[in-house]
Image (cartoon, rainbow, N blue to C red):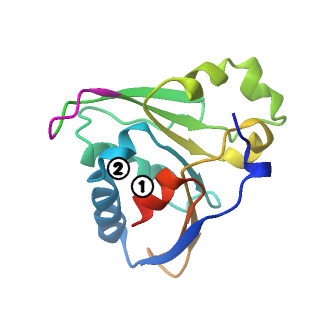
Amino acid sequence: MSTVAHATILASRTLHWSDEAACAAAAAALAAHPALRDACIELEGPLGAGKTTFVRHLLRALGVDGRIKSPSYAIVESYVLPPRDGLPAAAATHFDFYRFTDAREWVDAGLRDLYAAPGLKLAEWADRARELLPAPDLRLVLEPLDDEARRVEVQAWTPRGVELLA
């Protein structure tokens, strides 16, 4: 498992989301890529930047019904992506490492196995466990601007990430 410390950004793109509708549109565009169903995506940004909002829009665009909760207290929330466009059902796991004070908590919590399993992985506050995490396919760095607007740097760290970025 390669860690981010040994990886480099292969490509990047900067987006501007003027409002939540633009966030939802970006999530829907990303959800259209079949490779996303087995990708690892990290979301960075300060509290209130829209990380969980983006995850909710992405999971909705992937067909998840029902309540989509923030994993801030539970650390992990799991979902099933329904079959779509000839693709089988897949797992989606949403992580939030905000409460971690040491990267080893990632191992202690048994998350290594969840990261190694097939399916979509979405991680908020990954910087708190980054030294032990595999390189993400994509990292979205969200920067709040005025009102609802966001500047989003989308970084591809793997060949799959480059495919998703295209």
- Please state which of residues 52 and 127 is positioned toward the viewer in this rendering: 127
Task: Name which residue lies at 78% across and 50% down.
Answer: 6
Say left or right for 35 vs 104: left
Q: Magenta span has 87?
A: yes
Mark 2: which amino acid? Leu
Q: Quadrant of the C terminus?
A: bottom left
Task: Name which residue lies at 37% across and 28% down.
Answer: 79
Local packing at callout 1 (Cα closer than 10 Å; few below 14, some 14-19, many 20+) is many
Say left or right for 81 vs 112: left
Kindly indicate whether the residue at mark 2 contacts the one at mark 1 (C-beta within 8 angstroms). Answer: yes
The residue sitting at the bottom extreme is 146
Q: Quadrant of the N terminus?
A: top right
Local packing at callout 2 (Cα closer than 10 Å; few below 14, some 14-19, many 20+) is many
- Please state which of residues 162 and 31 is positioned toward the viewer in this rendering: 162
The residue sitting at the left extreme is 85
Q: Magenta span has 45?
A: no
Q: Is residue 74 visible?
A: no
Mark 1: which amino acid? Phe
Q: Which residues are magenta?
A: 85-90
Q: Which residue is mark 2?
A: 58
Tell me: residue 20, above or below residue 135.
Answer: below
Task: Name which residue lies at 22% across and 39% down.
Answer: 63
Q: Residue 54: which disc? A: 1
Q: How much space separates mark 1 and mark 2, taking CA atoms?
A: 6 Å
What element does badge 2 sit on? helix
**Residue 25 pos. (x, y %):** 28, 65
**Residue 147 pos. (x, y %):** 47, 78
